Image (cartoon, rainbow, N blue to C red):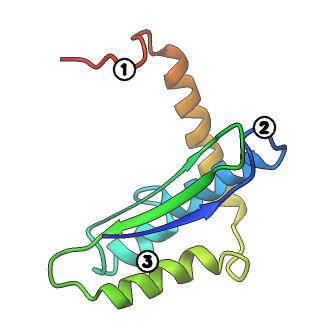
Amino acid sequence: MLASLYRTVAGSHPEYPAIDVLVQVLGDVPAGRLHKALVQKGLASSTWGAERQLHDPGFMYFGAQLPQGADINKARAVMLDVVEDIAKHKITAAEVERARTRLLNDIERAQLDSKPAGEHAV
């Protein structure tokens, strides 16, 4: 398993929505950049990205689960290249729109969920 953690601005910061979009662009499955670079090329069996919107500066993190016998050094290099070279590989308008749609859908689903927090269907 691989993971990388990056500090972010506080959740109340006006630039925080960009963190949400960035995490979606990188971590979404199956359209995210990490999934395409690692899973679709056989370097990992799954990938993810998440962020924590906190009162104080928080963090975002990305990871990959590797199949047995995988080359961890190659997978690590690819994962870090995808995440850390985002400035070289600009986010496209289509990626922003896909992330925006997914985030808005997540908000709508959360508002429609009438179960109290922590309660799960049996």
Mark-to-mark CA distance, 2 and 3: 32 Å
Q: Quadrant of the N terminus?
A: bottom left
The crowding category of the residue bearing disc 2, from other C-alpha atoms within 10 Å (few below 14, some 14 to 19, many at least 20), is: few
Please tell me how crowded label 1 is: few (under 14), some (14-19), or many (20+) other residues with Cα within 10 Å.
few
- Tell me the mark number nearer the camera, choosing from 2 and 3: 2
Numbered tag placed on residue 37 in the rendering: 3
Residues packed near mark 3 inside 10 Å, few (<14), some (14 to 19) or many (20 plus): some
- Element type at mark 3: helix
Residue 97 visible from this viewpoint: no
Q: Position of residue 43 (x, y in %)?
A: 30, 81
Q: Which residue is mark 2?
A: 12
* Residue drawn where x is 47% and y is 78% of the image: 79
Instruction: Report helix, strand or loop for mark 1.
Output: loop
The picture places residue 75, in percent across and down from the top left corner, at 37, 83
**Please, what is the three-letter code of the amino acid marked with disc 3?**
Ala
| Sequence-first disc among 1 and 3 | 3
SS of the residue under disc 2: loop
Q: Residue 118, labelled with which disc?
A: 1
Report the amino acid beneath label 2: Ser
Residue 1 numbered tag: none
**Is residue 78 in sight in this rendering?**
yes
In-image side of 118 versus 53 (left or right): left
Residue drawn at 24 percent across, 17 percent down: 121
Q: Marks 1 and 3, how far apart in space?
A: 34 Å
Q: CA distance from mark 1 to mark 2?
A: 24 Å
Front-most of residues 40 and 119: 119
